[in-house]
Amino acid sequence: MPLDAKRSLQLNDQGQLRHFLSLDGLPRELLTEILDTADSFLEVGARAVKKVPLLRGKTVCNVFFENSTRTRTTFELAAQRLSADVISLNVSTSSTSKGETLFDTLRNLEAMAADIFVVRHADSGAAHFIAEHVCPNLAIINGGDGRHAHPTQGMLDMLTIRRHKGGFENLSVAIVGDILHSRVARSNMLALKTLGCPDIRVIGPKTLLPVGIEQYGVKVYTDLAEGLKDVDVVIMLRLQRERMTGGLLPSEGEFYRLYGLTEQRLKLAKPDALVMHPGPINRGVEIESAVADGPQSVILNQVTYGIAIRMAVLSMAMSGQATQRQLTAEEQN
């Protein structure tokens, strides 16, 4: 799908967010608006009553065709803090396993009159397919699709970096590990590039690096020590055994020996480098416990910022949908 088609599907006629499917083609101003909105929501989490009324009377439906406790829980919390009603469906264990198609499932969910669907699916492009085929007043948020995109994870990582480093213009960021299977890596590369990060590095064994990854404007390293030199941020990725076929990796022990982030290796980065990980962590496979729990780790901060980012995206998509309805109604009159 060409970029402009992707973009027009996600934005309304005034350029506001109405679906959040991918960071591909979204302008810097919009990504900055998401970060600024999330910043304003962070203080809600510190209140005695953690609620704002922005989505009161609206229904958010989490439709997870693929399991994920962390993403589902933070979307639930985000929707609840916006005062929405929340329904969570783990579809992977129900209707589709009985032979119902994605299309049938959607039609049934539409009949429940939800306002926002948060969709997680093992197939790349599923969220785009849903956004193209549901009734126009529904907002679709991509909670992760196959190897393609995980845009809210990308944005919560950007919020983490911005809050700890102030901006992106002078940073070196290294993304390490299983790039091939990682939708998080793709979303992060797109977001960093759009937000003006001048030095984006990807580090991993050749078998876990996608062909043509240079098109994202990144520098590719197969040697960890070389790639980590003087970076400001290290984003470690989970080894996705469940997505691997064939002999992509000799063993987890071998991976850790060559690419695991230890205290010793972290010294190659700048002294104040951040350590990030989208979770769940495989300790002793991608990262040493002493680093994951150490002073440079912001892994738990990422979870906190994730709620604020998801609040921002839910509220902005709902607002964009409302504006589009108004514009359409004015045109018809």
Image (cartoon, grey):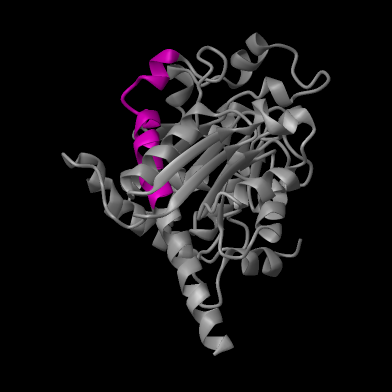
Compared to residue 7, the image places residue 121 above or below, namely above
Task: Indicate yes or no whether the magenta region holds residue 309.
Answer: yes
- For residue 2, which quarter of the picture? bottom right
Left or right, 230 with respect to 182, comes to left
Q: Residue at the spot x=54%, y=17% of the render?
A: 282
Instruction: Look at the image and tell me whether residue 143 can be seen.
Output: no
Query: What is the magenta segment's predominant secondary structure?
Result: helix
Residue 154's spot in the image, x, y percent? 51, 45
Assign the N terminus to one quadrant of the image. Answer: bottom right
Compared to residue 265, the image places residue 234 above or below, namely below
Residue 139's spot in the image, x, y percent? 54, 58
Residue 144's spot in the image, x, y percent? 60, 41
Name the outermost residue toward the front.
Answer: 111
Compared to residue 27, the image places residue 296 above or below, namely above
Left or right, 235 with respect to 206, comes to left
Assign the C terminus to one quadrant of the image. Answer: bottom right
- For residue 299, which quarter of the picture? top left
Compared to residue 204, the image places residue 261 above or below, namely above
Name the outermost residue toward the bottom.
Answer: 333
Task: Indicate yes or no whether the magenta region holds residue 118.
Answer: no
Name the outermost residue toward the right.
Answer: 246
- What residue span does the magenta drawing correspond to? 289-311
Q: Residue at the spot x=64%, y=33% of the render?
A: 91
